[in-house]
């Protein structure tokens, strides 16, 4: 990867949480709490319609992914399924969210 296309973060994680024991607007409320937490981490976050992507250090991202699931339980879900995709490149870094998506969101 060339220097201009790489984000120096060593990993990126896409996470989707599905809280069980809730329905309709309650699911949205719980997921919104998770997104609020992700935005508060200080890391780069990209919210999509099915999952949210976050970039940072490998260990920190996995701590965050675990906390997302705990938030669902604290917010009243009986259980939670989490679908997590991860890319880890500690030597060279990962392509940034902007590099991967900007051309698709340009005005």
Image (cartoon, helix red, strand yellow):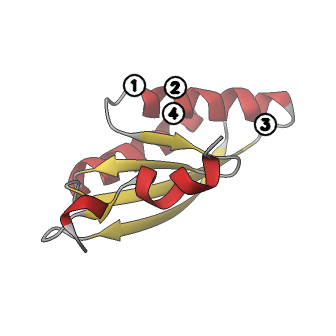
Residue lying farthest to the right in this orientation: 24
Residue 13 is at least partly visible in this image: yes
Q: Which of marks 3 and 1 precedes in the sequence? A: 3
In the image, residue 36 sits, relative to residue 103, either above or below, namely above
**Looking at the rendering, in which quadrant would you find the C terminus?**
top right
In the image, residue 33 sits, relative to residue 81, either above or below, namely above
In the image, residue 5 sits, relative to residue 37, either above or below, namely below
Query: Circles 2 and 3: CB distance less than 8 Å?
Result: no
Which residue is painted at 78% across and 28% down in the image? Answer: 26
Q: What residue is pinned by disc 4?
A: 71
The label shown at residue 40 is 1
Percent position of residue 39, x then y: 44, 29
Q: Which of marks 4 and 3 precedes in the sequence? A: 3
Kind of element beneath mark 1: loop
For the residues labelled 2 and 1, the Cα–Cα distance comes to: 6 Å
Q: What residue is pinned by disc 3?
A: 22
For the residues labelled 2 and 3, the Cα–Cα distance comes to: 19 Å
Q: Is residue 72 left or right of residue 88?
A: right
Query: Circles 1 and 4: CB distance less than 8 Å?
Result: no
Residue 74 is at least partly visible in this image: no
For the residues labelled 3 and 4, the Cα–Cα distance comes to: 14 Å
Choose between 64 and 78: the one closer to the eye.
Answer: 64
Residue lying farthest to the left in this orientation: 91
Query: Circles 2 and 1: CB distance less than 8 Å?
Result: yes
Q: Which of marks 3 and 2 precedes in the sequence? A: 3
Q: What residue is pinned by disc 2?
A: 36
């Amino acid at each position: 990867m060339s220097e201009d296309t790489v984000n120096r973060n060593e990993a990126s994680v896409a996470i989707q949480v599905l809280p069980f024991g809730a329905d309709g607007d309650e699911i949205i409320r719980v997921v919104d709490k998770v997104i609020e937490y992700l935005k508060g981490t200080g890391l780069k976050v990209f919210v999509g319609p099915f999952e949210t992507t976050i970039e940072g250090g490998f260990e920190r991202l996995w701590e965050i992914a675990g906390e997302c699931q705990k938030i669902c339980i604290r917010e009243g879900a009986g259980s939670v399924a989490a679908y997590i995709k991860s890319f880890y490149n500690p030597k060279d870094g990962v392509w940034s969210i902007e590099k991967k998506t900007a051309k698709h969101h340009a005005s």
